[in-house]
Amino acid sequence: MDKGGSRSYCGGMLSDAIDKTLVHRVLVIKFRHHGDVLLTSPVFRALRAAIADVEVDALIYEDSAEMLTLNPDIRTIHTINRRSRGWPLARKIASEWRLLKTLRARRYDLIVHLTEHPRGALLVKMLKPRYAVARRYPGRRGRWWRRTFTHLYDVPARQRHTVETHLDALRRLGLGIPAHTKGLRLVPGAPATTAVAERLTASGIAQRPFIVIHPTSRWLFKAWPIESMARLIRALLDAGHTVIVTGGPDAEERHMIGAILAAVGPADRLVDWSGTLSLKELAALLGQARLLVGIDSAPMHMAAALGTPVVAIFGPSGDHEWAPWQTRAAVLTAPLSCRPCGFAGCGDGQVSECLEAVTVERVLAAATGLLDETQGQPCASP
């Protein structure tokens, strides 16, 4: 049962801080998309720093697994297929039973649930760990949610970065967070690194510094206007830069990137790799780039994890919570009182006027400034 209502401090320690000597295995649950999952990576590192010889597992959606695979702080990654809702009942039950058996065999002492998804609470009920922590959601989950977790934590009214909010779960347990554990960790791996090196060689730019432009997101209302992005790319090309354009495989994203490239026109130093890279290959590419220019999307967080400078254009989403973490970055927004609204465009109309208000000149100046700062420095290492 949640002890959050009666906690007290004694000698700088929470009176209900967990006994670390009783924690040998931890399960961290995060049911979200790629970037959100990558932003949990400091949690794994902090747990391993705080608890001696602990084994930390992850439970995430299958399509976001590449954000955490090869991470040395994680022992096992368990996954759930996001499309399982549409499966025949027998197949779904069999899959759920296999997962439950696997998780029970791990005998977790602590579960850290980092979303409001009810599945995480159900797993706490079924797995019965000694400790379980989640965010408090007043009025949403009621007594059932409160009684499920031994510890609940609150989020300050003043918004701060999502990484810090994740780490609040550990702070609530009485665990310290060393500064060196707060960085993101993303490992492209040797196969992806080799594949990207071969593609760069085949494209004739293996020895040439380059900028990556990632114009799209699965939610296109976050995207900068086509005309603005095309003008920016043309300006970077005219300044002598090599530009590699990347994007997701989704048909709408590919269509938007096609429109951008058509507006740019033919160019010798422009390479289109949109829709052709795996997530690990994209990570390997970003790790070698001089700069990423993009929007609020997973590649922005991937670049930050790899130490690559970022120009990030934000519209309706909150830059305080989602800005590039611990890397050189320029975050560009419009000074409109309504943002960040969190809507799918103004009036949910899929078009965000706050993005239209960010000028090409501002983005170009930000990109030039970051490139000047890093002139002559080696590329980040994947």
Image (spheres, rainbow, N blue to C red):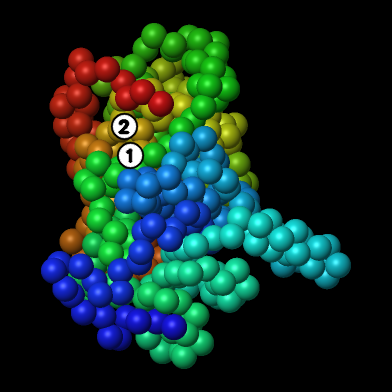
Q: Could you tell me which secondary element the residue under label 2 belongs to?
A: loop
- Residue contact at pointers 2 and 1, CB within 8 angstroms: yes
- Marks 2 and 1 sit apart, C-alpha to C-alpha, by 6 Å
Bin the neighbour count of mark 2 within 10 Å (Cα to Cα): few under 14, some 14-19, many 20 and up.
many
Residue 4 point in image, percent of width and height: 32, 81
Which residue corresponds to the image point at 30% horizontal and 33% vertical from the top-left?
307
Q: Amino acid at mark 1?
A: Ala
Which residue corresponds to the image point at 71% horizontal and 60% vertical from the top-left?
101
Which residue is tagged 1? 304
Q: Amino acid at mark 2?
A: Thr
Which residue is tagged 2? 308
Residue 207 in which image quadrant: top left
Bin the neighbour count of mark 1 within 10 Å (Cα to Cα): few under 14, some 14-19, many 20 and up.
many
**Pick the front one: 155 or 330:** 155
Residue 266 point in image, percent of width and height: 47, 22
Q: Quadrant of the C terminus?
A: top left
